């Protein structure tokens, strides 16, 4: 399966290619003023701290390689000129609906605490933060 | 009873007294029990509850106050919360989660009298295009059990294709209803963003997530969509629709008008396999014979839909999944020594590899120094993609395109995530634009089903369903079944 586009004329002197080249080999390439990002294992460690995510060394190696490929793919976005385009957060341009400030929910603490791994006297139990 | 029966057939059977709802439900429960070992399409089967619901439906049917869906079985993707029945989202993180409430989509189908058979398997947190990332093991395609059924609603698609249920619910963030429907030879509708309530649907990417129906025929899809869609105050992005407007649209759509259908050239340009592409030529000729007219259109930003989608969806996922902290519900690691370790290990052990990959991608895209370059950039490109569709719908009534770039692939074949993401190349544009899209079986390629995708303007579901129904009155692709054990 090969997916390949060549997009010309989207920006001054820009030719972007995005897709799969060759049989098994993947290439998401954007030919424009952009440096291919190298992801180091220390970058993965930083992201894991930000995301509060523990990963083992094997996963860390995979994550590094995978993320490099994913970032190369999303870097193709830089080829699209968007200076005068506003970001779109909602596809129908809807705005947040407001409702009257009235109580509509009942207290269901007991039902919700049925789901927790550890609870005592209506409080959620977690390990000590300060020793 | 026939495992390939449509909801419409079964409703007629119930009304004619050929069988009761209890008999019907028992038939499907027995099939699941005997045959799902081949497909792994269900995570939970709710036999007792189903038989109680079916008995109640039989009472309504006898009393003459039954609706069109009363007593008919359905399975729910295990992303929809169901009170008292566990909702795992295909993840170890929620292996023990029993929701204290029903999702609105589920509640609406209960009100319509439908009987829940159980909860279907899926890619973990709906992140995947193959149903291989589930904590409960991969789902097998009934057309060839060595192949994937597509994903993420692959359990729902496989269960319908295998005749284990006549219908199922699914969710579609970037193609998760349409692509498995295509790869499994059934129909699936991703409604307009906001048409079906997201309340009680485990969140993946909130600006894209949309629930919808999966079934054998477009007529069944229309029945289910009617019951599932509607404004819900509990969902902050639920669409407010004027009932008069909807009726007018339905009348216009039902008038049997000959439509102008656009063929987006960027979609067809990348179909490398000419024999596969020929299936769509054949479908086009069928629709032409019915009086519809085709024109080529251009959606120039299509090549950037997959990159924009994976920035937006991953960014939203990384924030939505921050709630799984091991404290209030879900998986908790054993013997943590600090609160930080409890968070990190619970998440590290509770999430699978693909989910972690998306969280890391999203965290990267949202981090200081990259937010403008990735997240805001992707949102700007999203506007261009939506505007491509808006422009196209000024000259055409609907668009016809492939649903997926190929047929079902072998389990384990695609290990590179970026290659897997290309499965969504034809489905993510409609997701980003928030428009409705219907997957309809339209032929076979090397013995495996091929699906076409019909896309319409916002809230144009009625027209798509009319067009799909028109196609199915002239073809029988949707009635073909794999070799189903009796």
Image: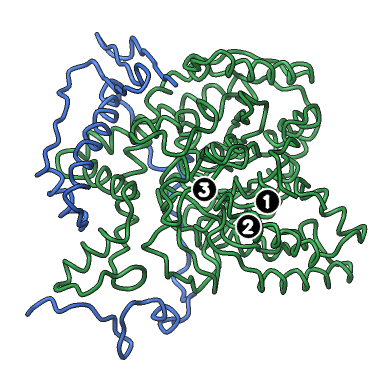
Chain colours: A blue, B green
Residue B369, horizontal then vertical, whole percent: 14, 39
Q: Quadrant of residue B66?
A: bottom right
Q: Is residue B268 above or below residue B316?
A: above
Disc 1 from disc 3: Cα separation: 17 Å
- The image shows residue B462 at horizontal and vertical percentages of 70, 38
Q: Which residue is mark 3?
A: B139
Query: Which label sits in the foreground, 1 or 3?
Result: 3
Q: Secondary structure at mark 2?
A: strand
Q: Nearer the viewer, residue B343 or B43?
A: B43
Q: CA distance from mark 2 to mark 1?
A: 7 Å
- Position of residue B284 relative to residue B346, above or below, is above
Q: Which residue is mark 1?
A: B167
CA gap between label 3 and label 2 equals: 15 Å
Tag 1, which secondary structure?
strand
Which structural element holds mark 3?
loop
Q: Earlier in the sequence, mark 1 or mark 3?
A: 3
Question: Closer to the N terminus: mark 2 or mark 1?
Answer: 2
Chain name for mark 1? B
**Label 2: chain letter:** B
Residue furthest bottom in the image:
A121
> Left or right of A118: which side holds B345?
left
Q: Do the residues under discs 2 and 1 have CB atoms within 8 angstroms?
A: yes
Q: Residues within 10 Å of mark 2 (few under 14, many from 20)?
A: many
Residue B64 is left or right of residue B485, and the answer is right
For the image shown, how many numbered marks are present on the structure?
3
Residue under label 2: B75
């Amino acid at each position: 399966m090969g997916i390949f586009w060549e997009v010309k004329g989207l920006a001054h002197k820009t030719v972007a290619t995005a897709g799969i080249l060759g049989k098994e080999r993947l290439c998401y390439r954007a030919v424009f003023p952009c440096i291919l990002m190298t992801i180091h294992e220390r970058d993965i460690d930083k992201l894991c701290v930000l995301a509060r995510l523990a990963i083992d060394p094997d996963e860390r190696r995979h994550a590094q390689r995978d993320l490099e490929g994913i970032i190369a793919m999303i870097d193709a976005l830089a080829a699209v000129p968007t200076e005068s385009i506003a970001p779109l957060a909602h596809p129908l341009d809807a705005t947040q609906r407001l409702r009257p400030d009235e109580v509509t929910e009942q207290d269901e603490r007991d039902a919700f605490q049925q789901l927790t791994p550890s609870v005592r006297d209506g409080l959620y139990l977690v390990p000590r933060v300060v020793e | 009873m026939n495992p390939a029966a449509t909801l419409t057939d079964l409703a007629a059977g119930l009304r004619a007294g050929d069988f009761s709802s209890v008999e019907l439900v028992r038939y499907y429960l027995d099939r699941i029990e005997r045959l799902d070992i081949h497909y792994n399409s269900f995570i939970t089967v709710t036999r007792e509850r189903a038989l109680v619901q079916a008995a109640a439906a039989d009472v309504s049917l006898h009393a003459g106050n039954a609706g069109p869906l009363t007593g008919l079985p359905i399975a729910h993707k295990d992303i929809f919360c169901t009170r008292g029945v566990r909702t795992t989202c295909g993840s170890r993180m929620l292996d023990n989660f029993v929701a204290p409430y029903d999702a609105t989509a589920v509640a609406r189908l209960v009100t319509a009298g439908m009987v829940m058979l159980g909860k279907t398997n899926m890619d973990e947190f709906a992140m995947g295009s193959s149903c291989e990332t589930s904590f409960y093991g991969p789902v097998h395609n009934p057309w060839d059990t060595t192949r994937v059924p597509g994903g993420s609603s692959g359990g729902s698609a496989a269960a319908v294709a295998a005749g284990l249920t006549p219908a199922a619910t699914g969710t579609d963030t970037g193609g998760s209803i349409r692509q498995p429907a295509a790869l499994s030879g059934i129909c699936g509708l991703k409604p307009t963003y906001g048409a079906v309530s997201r309340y009680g649907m485990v969140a993946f990417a909130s600006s894209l997530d949309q629930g919808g129906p999966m079934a054998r025929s477009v007529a069944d899809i229309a029945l289910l969509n009617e019951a599932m869609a509607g404004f819900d105050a509990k969902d902050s992005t639920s669409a407010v629709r004027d009932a008069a407007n909807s009726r007018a649209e339905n009348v216009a759509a039902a008038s049997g008008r000959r439509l102008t259908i656009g063929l987006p050239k960027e979609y067809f340009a990348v179909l490398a396999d000419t024999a596969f592409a020929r299936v769509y030529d054949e479908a086009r000729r069928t629709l032409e014979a019915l009086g519809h007219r085709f024109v080529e259109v251009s959606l120039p930003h299509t090549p950037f839909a997959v990159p924009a989608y994976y920035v937006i969806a991953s960014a939203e996922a990384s924030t939505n999944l921050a709630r799984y902290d091991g404290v209030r519900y879900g998986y908790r690691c054993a013997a943590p020594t600090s609160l930080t370790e409890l968070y990190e290990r619970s998440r590290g052990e509770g999430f699978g590899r693909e989910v972690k990959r998306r969280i890391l991608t999203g965290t990267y895209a949202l981090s200081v120094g990259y937010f403008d370059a990735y997240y805001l950039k992707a949102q700007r490109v999203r506007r261009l993609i939506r505007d491509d569709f808006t422009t196209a719908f000024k000259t055409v009534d609907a668009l016809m395109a492939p649903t997926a770039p190929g047929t079902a692939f072998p389990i384990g074949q695609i290990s590179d995530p970026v290659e897997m993401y290309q499965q969504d190349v034809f489905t993510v544009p409609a997701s980003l634009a928030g428009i409705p899209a219907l997957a309809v079986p339209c032929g076979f390629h090397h013995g495996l089903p091929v699906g076409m995708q019909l896309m319409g303007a916002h809230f144009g579901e009625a027209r798509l369903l009319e067009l799909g129904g028109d196609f199915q009155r002239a073809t029988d692709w949707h009635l073909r079944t794999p070799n189903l054990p009796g």
